[in-house]
């Protein structure tokens, strides 16, 4: 089998196989933005690295540089006998679905989308619950009563973050004003720090003093703009508090690392939905932001977290409840 020049496997195995015999190694296909985006993809990478460290085994990986590579990468992993093959991001859905049908004896998984096949595990998150918590924190920290949101690609999933954030902001302050912008409508929106910075600056000019970025690598520009302007920012997916210590109010944790690690450790076909109760989302508190989060803020956000877990507070899901009209 010939490989295209764009297809690089950073980890190769010495295992020999023939026909449809499967290797023990899993494979991961990262999406747009690269595995070191300090956000979504990097969380997935950390999950695979944890599995590798614990098991002493290798895995195959590929970083998508354009959307046409997704299905090709997944198929080549399958042809190598890798299992499970994990697609990172909703954009991998069609490729996973097609290739999983062609290789029914192999295991596949997708993060952030549902593919209903007997050999596929789908992992989705209750992003609205974690976003609610950081929205409440944003309102409590804001001095102007205006908080901002910068999304990446304008898709329902990112609107889901925004909707939860707005609900949390208004839960903490019923008069809070939330300004929102999306970076773009293509995959390039995940890796445009310059545009992220511009959108954040425009919001600051309108009175926003806390901004939440759910935009992959684009968020790096948002955080820099917040630091430069003396404002506060909120990270996403991974704990990004360390990127701009003293400026990052918190980060909305989306435990993609846990999801990838769990899939690698034990593939379970079907749908897994991870929220606050399951430890799939949360907010980050560490030495980098402890001086920004007051005891009162922590008390209130922990109370809200407990109420969401118990069902006392129901956070509307943009994708399921037809909430937050945009």
Image (cartoon, rainbow, N blue to C red):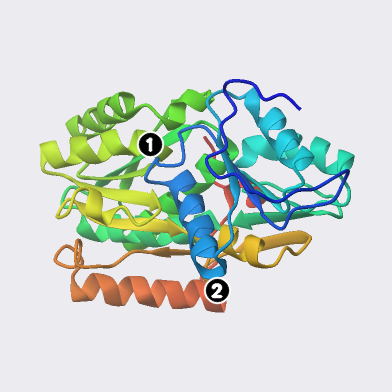
Q: Nearer the viewer, residue 302 or 279?
A: 279
At x 33%, y 64%, the residue is 284
Q: Position of residue 102 (x, y in %)?
A: 88, 39
Q: Residue at x 20, y 62 (%)?
A: 289
Residue sitting at x 66%, y 37%: 92
Q: Quadrant of the N terminus?
A: top right
* Residue 153 appears left or right of 29: left
Residue 263 drawn at (x, y percent) = 65, 61
The picture quadrant where one finds residue 126 is: bottom right
The residue that disc 1 covers is 217
Query: Neighbour class for label 1 at 10 Å: few (<14), some, many (≥20)?
Result: many
Q: Is residue 322 visible?
A: no
Whole-number angstrom distance, CA of label 2 to CA of label 1? 28 Å
Front residue (pair 315, 283): 283
Asked if 291 appears above or below 58 in the picture, the reply is below
Q: Pointers 2 and 1 in contact (CB under 8 A)?
A: no
Horizontal placement of 144 versus 261: left or right?
Answer: left
Rendered image quadrant of residue 2: top right
Q: Secondary structure at mark 2?
A: loop
**Which tag is nearer the camera, tag 2 or tag 1?**
1
Tell me if 209 is positioned left or right of 90 in this view.
left
Look at mark 2 in the image and give the residue it sits on.
277
């Amino acid at each position: 089998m010939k490989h295209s020049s764009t297809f690089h496997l950073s980890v190769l195995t010495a295992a020999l196989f023939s026909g449809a015999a499967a290797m023990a190694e899993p494979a991961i296909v990262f999406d747009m933005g690269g595995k070191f985006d300090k956000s979504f993809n990097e969380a997935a990478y950390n999950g695979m690295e944890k599995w590798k460290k614990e098991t002493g085994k290798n895995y195959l990986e590929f970083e998508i540089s354009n959307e046409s590579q997704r299905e090709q990468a997944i198929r080549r992993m399958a042809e190598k006998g890798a299992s499970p093959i994990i697609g990172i991001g909703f954009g991998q859905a069609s490729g996973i679905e097609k290739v999983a049908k062609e290789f029914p004896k192999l295991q596949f998984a997708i993060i952030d989308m549902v593919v209903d096949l007997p050999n596929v595990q789908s992992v989705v998150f209750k992003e609205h619950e974690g976003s609610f918590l950081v929205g409440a924190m944003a309102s409590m920290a804001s001095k102007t009563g205006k908080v901002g949101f910068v999304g990446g690609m304008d898709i329902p999933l990112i609107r889901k973050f925004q909707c939860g954030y707005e609900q949390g902001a208004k839960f903490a302050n019923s008069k809070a004003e939330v300004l929102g912008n999306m970076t773009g409508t293509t995959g390039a929106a995940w890796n445009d720090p310059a545009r992220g910075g511009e959108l954040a600056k425009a919001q600051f000019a309108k009175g926003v003093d806390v901004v939440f970025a759910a935009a992959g690598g684009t968020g790096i520009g948002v955080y820099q703009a917040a630091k430069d302007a003396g404002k506060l920012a909120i990270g996403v997916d991974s704990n990004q508090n360390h990127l701009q210590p003293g400026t990052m109010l918190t980060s909305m944790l989306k435990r993609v690392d846990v999801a990838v690690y769990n899939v690698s450790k034990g593939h379970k076909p079907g749908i897994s939905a991870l929220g606050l109760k399951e430890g799939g989302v949360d907010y980050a508190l560490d030495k980098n932001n402890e001086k920004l989060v007051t005891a009162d803020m922590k008390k209130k956000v922990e109370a809200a977290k407990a109420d969401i877990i118990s069902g006392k507070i129901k956070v509307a899901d943009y994708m399921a409840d037809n909430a937050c009209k945009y």
